[in-house]
Amino acid sequence: MTPMIDPRKLPQILYIEQSAEARSLVRRLLSHKYVILEAADALDGFQLAEETQPNLILVDYNLRQVTGSEAATRLHKILPLTPIVIISANLADGVRERALAAGAVGFIPKPIDDDFEAQVDAYLNGKVEILEDAEKHLQAYQQELVERLEGNVRQLSATVEKNKHLLQQNERMFSMLERRHKLLETAARVGQMVTSILDMDDLLKHTVNIICSEFNFYYSGIFLVSDDNEWAILRAGYGAAGRKMMADNHRLHLDERSMIGNSILKQQAKIALDVAGEESRFKNPFLPSTRSEMALPLIVQEHALGALTVQSDMLNAFSEDDVTSLQAMADQIAIAINNAQLMFKLEDATAEIVRTKTFEAIATATGEAIHWVGNKAAPIPGSVKRVREDLIYILALAAQAHELDLNNESISAAIEVIKEEAEIKGIDLKKTLAEMSAMKPNRLQALVSVESLMEDLDIAENSAVTILSIKEGLIGPARKRNEIPVSLREMIKDTVTGMGLPEGVVEMEWAEDMPNALVDPRQVEQVFNNLIKNAWEALGQTPDPKIYVNGRRDGNSKFVLVTVKDNGPGIPKEIQDKIWVSFFTTKGGSGGTGLGLSSVMQIVNQHGGSISLDSEVGKGTMFSVRLPVAKKL
């Protein structure tokens, strides 16, 4: 049995060779008695030699970075006591001698033969090949080093020049890419900005300002086509020149005598890299420093809205990237302008519709108000007529009191006054008495009935009170508000208590963190009085009627939310929008004025809050009131 060999006690041989096949051959021949270290190039070999300090170094002559001789020189400086052997297939004159002059102790020619192991053993045991005429070969080796160094310097210089050229190209490319990136970034920012601006003047002003500031152009302006398609009118201009032209109402004929007109008519970009040679260009006295100009059409769905002009005080100022980016930006601006124009037209049309609807609503409300007041006032003339007739009969009876022996001077004087005033008013008391004498007793008793007289007076009084309540409902919300922090919880509890509703009808629930509201207590009390009163009246035919009042902080922390919900019959969907209209009522002849919810909405809106309705037939109705929270001091 062969004893185990401790590899730590074996000599180490470093082989520097770029060929994997050659390294594999040496490993197969020597690994049974040596530790073989391998490096595929000179630089790795230098590092490995310094780290491991092997007993012998084998170096192939044809390495990539350096020759084997140069590698031997470097290795000899790193490990002066370590033998270095060159292995080479180059057997030309002077190769072996220059290798030995470089510091190698031996030279083994390729291909490697059966004597290779014995040769390695000899060099490890101290063999050193003798170099005759060493000075001569050392000079030859040094001359070779100088020539290689000069070649390396020339190659390095060429590489430096090439790298310098590449650096310049890269700098130009980087500059172009940076500008392109800036163009695209600015175009995207302008596109994002203009799509969010719907006011035409703001849109155009911001656009020309950002184009000049971001692209460092001399001037930028936007022209829009006039309604008669005869002019291109300047709607925004950059800087002092732009302001002067705007003040002068600057415009250009829509023809081919200007780049703007040409661009709009042909729907194509027009570029003048040297304006001196451009015939179809308006020479603007406000812009004397212009050297390059570009006009880009603003097109939406094949319709030219106008044109964007961009001007520079440098010749050849516009690259293809500029044209591409600015045209893309012009397309976005055109869309934004079109949107702004459509929005303006929509707002104008909406305003006209609102005006028309407002007049219709006013006319309807006025007609309904007149009709409603007329209905309430209708009983008054009849009642007054009956009271007047009854009064005449009573006066006639009173006038006959002198025939009675009252023996009262005051009463006699009062009767005389009655006669005199009746005569002044043209009332013939004697004729009235004659008519009364001819009447049957029961008829006469009815005419002078105090109960009938009071009934007519009650009718007149109730009508007058109702009409006055209409006045309060119409002008009450418009009174000046006195807004203070108010606990809606306490206010509504007091309101419900004062309404005298049956016990248990109203159930209230309040969140612990519910804040105070900033409101006019008198007006807001009217809001919840109306809502709870309406809910109670809606529950007339409902078994087990319930009204639920719930208060809490709204999802928007700036508001407090109070809901008033009932389990009544609900409000039909077709009239839910109408309930907020003045004088609309679902109570028929039961006494409603139709002003309650109209007044409620007006009060809530004037406080900066909101009110909404949620109702379904058969499932009850809920009103949600949002009012502003009082800020904590």
Image (tube, rainbow, N blue to C red):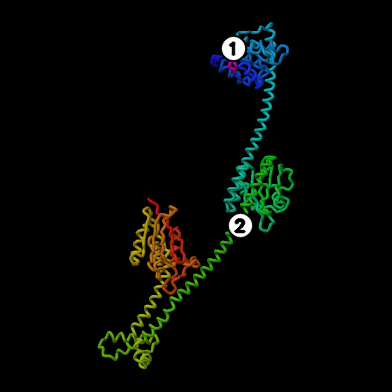
Helix, strand or loop at label 1? It is loop
Looking at the image, residue 374 lies above or below residue 598:
below
Identify the magenta region.
Answer: 32-36
Circle 1 sits on which residue? 82
What x and y, as percent, mark residue 305? 66, 54
Q: Residue at x 55, y 15 (%)?
A: 1
Q: Callout 2 environment at 10 Å: few (<14), some (14 to 19), or many (20+)?
A: few
Q: Quadrant of residue 37?
A: top right
Looking at the image, residue 395 lies above or below residue 13:
below
Distance of label 2 from label 1 (alpha carbons): 91 Å
Three-letter code, disc 2: Leu
- Frontmost residue, 17 versus 393: 17
Looking at the image, residue 546 lies above or below residue 43:
below
Q: Nearer the viewer, mark 2 or mark 1?
A: 1
- Magenta-colored stretch includes residue 524: no
Circle 2 sits on which residue? 342
- Frontmost residue, 12 versus 610: 12
Three-letter code, disc 1: Thr
Residue 629 visible from this viewpoint: yes
Q: Callout 1 environment at 10 Å: few (<14), some (14 to 19), or many (20+)?
A: some
